[in-house]
Image (cartoon, grey):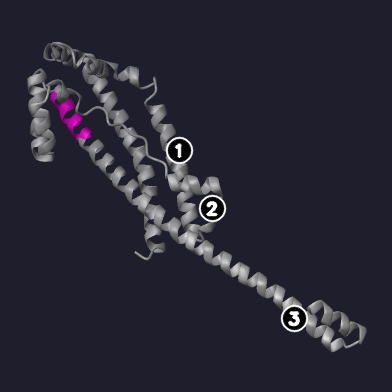
Amino acid sequence: MILARLSRAIRTQNWFAVVLEFVIVVAGVLLAFQVTAWNEGRQDRAAERAILLQLHEEFQELQAIELTYLARTAQQRRLIALWIEALEDPAPVDMARLRAIVLDFYDSEDPERGGVLASGPIHNVFTDPIGGERQPAASVVFQQLVASGDLRLIRSERLRAALTRRDVQRIQSVAALERNSAASNMPMAEGFLEPIFQAGSPDPVATLDAAMARPAFAGGLRTFAGVKTYNEVWYRYTHEETLAVLAILEEENGQ
């Protein structure tokens, strides 16, 4: 229709009509592009909103997991410190004394945990400050955004940068934790760690009493305490980045 009118205007040299038809065509094309861009922008904003909500929910979960882990690790370190203090006392430390130290500690710190230890096998008292080591978890949502290219949908440069910093810090922390728990440290803690594998023996009290009487036990425990402290520091670095991301997400989500 438009092409027919344009051809007729050209044949009759009606230049005003030619210009008018050309303007109509160009305006129509530009309007179509604008409508398409507007629709795509609206879809992108809806997708961004969904992403921000997903990230906020995930980082709230990460924060809770990290806080729980850090609280438990700090608790274990305090208990180990009491254990080391007892080992430095001239009086010998046996399982009866160790059990009293641990249960007294939990009587004020965590009565529920203390009750479980009091009613359970005695070797659980010995192994309680050990274990539970964990590497900081990755943000699954962030990794999916990077893999799909949808990270671009987040308009906030601050948030994109904070998410990237947190992931880089997590990778560095994991590498540091793995190095610290490698063979270079563990042989030094062997005098303490070896009895752990004997804690479930048929006569754990006698076995663990003998282990604690050896000089290597105290040195191994101090090494293990150092490893645990070092690991906690690196884990906390990632936790600080988690908090930074969460603060920006709460701003973006208007909370």
Q: Is residue 81 magenta?
A: yes
Amino acid on which the number 1 mark rests in the picture = Ile
**In the rendered image, the vertical position of residue 150 relative to residue 103, given as above or below:** below
**Element at badge 1?**
helix
Amino acid on which the number 3 mark rests in the picture = Ile
- Circle 2 sits on which residue? 150
**Which circle marks residue 53 in the picture?**
none
Q: Residue at x 25, y 20 (%)?
A: 219
Residue 163 x %, y %: 46, 50
Q: Quadrant of residue 173?
A: top left
**Element at badge 2?**
helix
- Circle 3 sits on which residue? 24
- Circle 1 sits on which residue? 171
Task: Give the mark toward the camera: 1 or 3.
Answer: 3
Q: Residue at x 41, y 34 (%)?
A: 174
Q: Earlier in the sequence, mark 2 or mark 3?
A: 3
Q: How many angstroms separate mark 1 from mark 2 (CA)?
A: 21 Å
Q: Quadrant of residue 115?
A: top left
Residue 79 x %, y %: 17, 32
Q: How many angstroms separate mark 2 from mark 3 (CA)?
A: 37 Å
Give 77 or 202, whichever is nearer the viewer: 202
Q: How many angstroms separate mark 1 from mark 3 (CA)?
A: 57 Å
**In the rendered image, the vertical position of residue 3 relative to residue 113, given as above or below:** below
Label 1 crowd (10 A; few <14 / some 14-19 / many >=20) = some
**In the rendered image, the vertical position of residue 205 relative to residue 115, given as above or below:** above
Looking at the rendered image, the quarter that the C terminus falls into is bottom left
